[in-house]
Structures are given as structure tokens and as C-alpha cells.
Amino acid sequence: MPPKDLSAFGEIQEGIRYLTPEALIWINKRLICIQTPGELIGVIKPNELSSSQQRPAQYRYYERTDDMYCLASVLMESLVRNHPFANANKRTAAAAGYMFLLMNGFELKAPNDEFVAIMLGLANHDYSREELENWLAYRSVDFDTRNLNAPDAWLDMFATTMTA
């Protein structure tokens, strides 16, 4: 389990909440433990994990965008392409994108089969990052983030996504 100090899971830069590398590792571990407990757990490419985690902030700076769907798609694409984990890279990318949006005021409301299809399509180069961005925008609604400031809110939020 992660520490109760949630600063390890998100950092705020210029009003945007970003997931930390520790959060991405925790997401990956949780997904495997819950869904496929026999799979190997671990980071196999630490530099690529760091690169993926930093990519939304860098993209935001260089492209001068505050579009959360764009930044979420950048994070998701980077995790899929960089393949930093031994297993569950697409699932981790999907959960990370979902959490990134939620932390920043949007909730993804997509059918599971559609979510799986878009992630597989991204991995197989059937969909571009821009198409993922448009899909995220189409399938998301506003979300009130004020409740995420409670002591265990981020953990509770993630636990809810794992059982839904």
C-alpha cells in the first residue's frame, strides 16, 4: 500500500495536478495484483518511466496548451510507447490517463470495451494521439475535484476505479 502522505502521488505545477513516478508505479502494481496476480511486477525502464511522467508538463510548456484531454493523451501515449513496466503498460496508461483527468476536473465516462479498443488501437498504431485526445474529450464530463483534498481521497478514488 502507498504511504498516506499523498504528496507522493501528485504534484501541482501552475495549477495542474500531475501524477508522480511513484503514483504510476503504484497504479501498475495495483492493476497487476487485482487483475493478473501471476504477472511480473516492476519497472524495467526507469528512464522511460521518468520521461513518460514528465512528458505532459513538457508538452504543455512547449506547445503552450492547458487542454487536459491533450495532456492526458500525451501521458497515455508515452506510457504505451515507452513500455516502462514489465507488464500492464496499456492498463497502467489507461488508469493513469483516467486519474490525470479526474485530478484535473474531468471524469472519463466510457464503456470498458471502448476504452480497451482505443488503448489497443493506440498501441497498434491504429489510432493517433490526437484521435485519443478527441475520444477523451468526447467521453468525459466535468468533475468536482474539491473532494480530492481529503486525507485518503486519491486512494479512495483509485480504489473506486479498480472495482467499477
Image: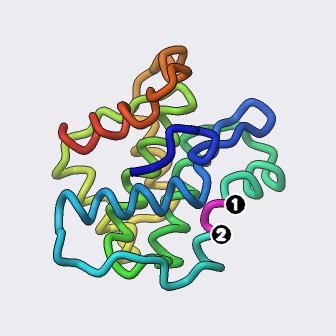
Look at label 2 and name its amino acid.
Ser
Q: Secondary structure at mark 2?
A: helix
Residue at 75% across / 49% down in the picture?
A: 60
Residue at 18% across / 69% down in the picture?
A: 37
Residue at 68% across / 42% down in the picture?
A: 11
Q: Contact (CB < 8 A) between labels 1 and 2?
A: yes
Say which of 153 and 109 sits in front. 153
Relative image position of residue 80 (x, y in whole percent): 45, 71
Relative image position of residue 30 (x, y in whole percent): 32, 57
Question: In the rendered structure, does residue 133 fall within the stretch colored magenta?
Answer: no
In this picture, is 150 found above or below 108? above
**Residue position for label 2:** 50
Residue at 38% across / 81% down in the picture?
A: 86
- Can you say which quadrant of the picture contains the C terminus? top left
Q: What residue range appears in magenta?
A: 50-54
Q: Main secondary structure of the magenta part?
A: helix
Residue 34: which quarter of the image? Answer: bottom left
Residue 109: which quarter of the image? Answer: top left
**CA neighbours of label 1 inside 10 A, class few (<14), some (14 to 19), many (20+):** some
Look at label 1 and name its amino acid.
Gln
Relative image position of residue 77 (x, y in whole percent): 50, 64
Q: Secondary structure at mark 1?
A: helix
Relative image position of residue 76 (x, y in whole percent): 49, 59
Residue 66: which quarter of the image? Answer: top right
In this picture, is 102 found above or below 25? above
Q: Distance of mark 1 from mark 2, alpha carbons?
A: 6 Å
**Residue position for label 1:** 54
In this picture, is 42 found above or below 152? below
Judged left or right of residue 52, residue 39 is left
